[in-house]
Image (tube, grey):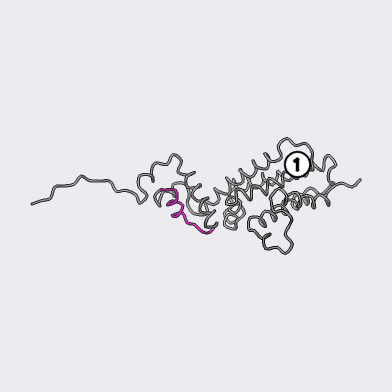
Amino acid sequence: MMENAKPSQKPRSPAGDKAYHHGDLRQALLDAALGLVATEGVRGFTLREAARAAGVSHNAPYRHFASRADILAALALEGQATLLQCLKDGMGQTANRKLRLEKLSIAYLEFATTHTAFFRVMFSPDVAAVQTPELQAAQKKTFACFVTEVEAAESDGTIRTGKVARFSLAGWSAMHGAAMLLIDRVLDRSPHPPGSQSPRDLARMVMGVLLEGMLARP
């Protein structure tokens, strides 16, 4: 005697119905990837793991990202936009040129310590190898924020003239180095640690030393 036929069921993805019902699949994948970077490092995840963390099927990421490198480039682009806004917000409407440079530096270090996963992605070798025109433009726009402030400080006589490019690169290099020391906790092991390791205090100290060499002489 034949068994009663069971109603047919559609195959389900491993992740269940959620695999097809994200309001914004792309952003869900980016958020999941950023979370994995925070816990596993830039090289510590795959597209499949990002899909699992986002609660979607392992094929879902390919609707938006052709490879792991593509999702990292998209994260770096989002990070650059966030950093630029943080720099602008940090300076606000401050008019004093020395103080603006100081606030710019503080904002850079605070971004690195509060958005560390973004920061690591933005400056990782993996992203450097997959530069897109959009990402290159965003990187230039962020660095231009430093250059604009140095140019303005030169124009009003706050710093010495003729060295905008050098001062801009030196300032960014110093701030980036200080940021890496903070997020990698290198200062914890330093034989001569600074009195304070807060981003604000370290930025003021580093920028203060730089400004001593940059200020216009009477």
Give the residue type at disc 1. Answer: Arg
Q: Which residue is situated farthest in the left direction here? A: 1
Q: Which residue is situated farthest in the front direction here? A: 195
Image coordinates for residue 45, horizontal then vertical, percent: 49, 57
Q: Secondary structure at mark 1?
A: helix
Q: Which residue is situated farthest in the bottom direction here? A: 191
Q: Nearer the viewer, residue 23 or 209?
A: 209
**Residue at coordinates 67% horizontally, 49% vertically from top-left?**
109
Image coordinates for residue 131, horizontal then vertical, percent: 59, 52
| Count of numbered labels shown in the rendering | 1
Question: Circle 1 is placed at which residue position?
Answer: 100
Image coordinates for residue 175, horizontal then vertical, percent: 71, 52
Inspect the magenta stretch and tell me whether residue 181 lies in it: no
Say which quadrant the C terminus sits in.
Answer: top right
Left or right of 98, for residue 11? left
**Residue at coordinates 65% horizontally, 42% vertically from top-left?**
86
Q: Name the chief secondary structure element in magenta.
A: helix
Mark 1 is surrounded, within 10 Å at the Cα level, by few (under 14), some (14 to 19) or many (20 or more) other residues, namely many
Left or right of 80, for residue 104? right
**Residue at coordinates 32% horizontally, 48% vertically from top-left?**
12
Q: Which residue is situated farthest in the right direction here? A: 218
Q: Which span of residues is magenta-colored?
A: 43-55
Inspect the magenta stretch and tell me whether residue 52 lies in it: yes
Left or right of 158, for residue 62? left
Image coordinates for residue 179, horizontal then vertical, percent: 67, 53
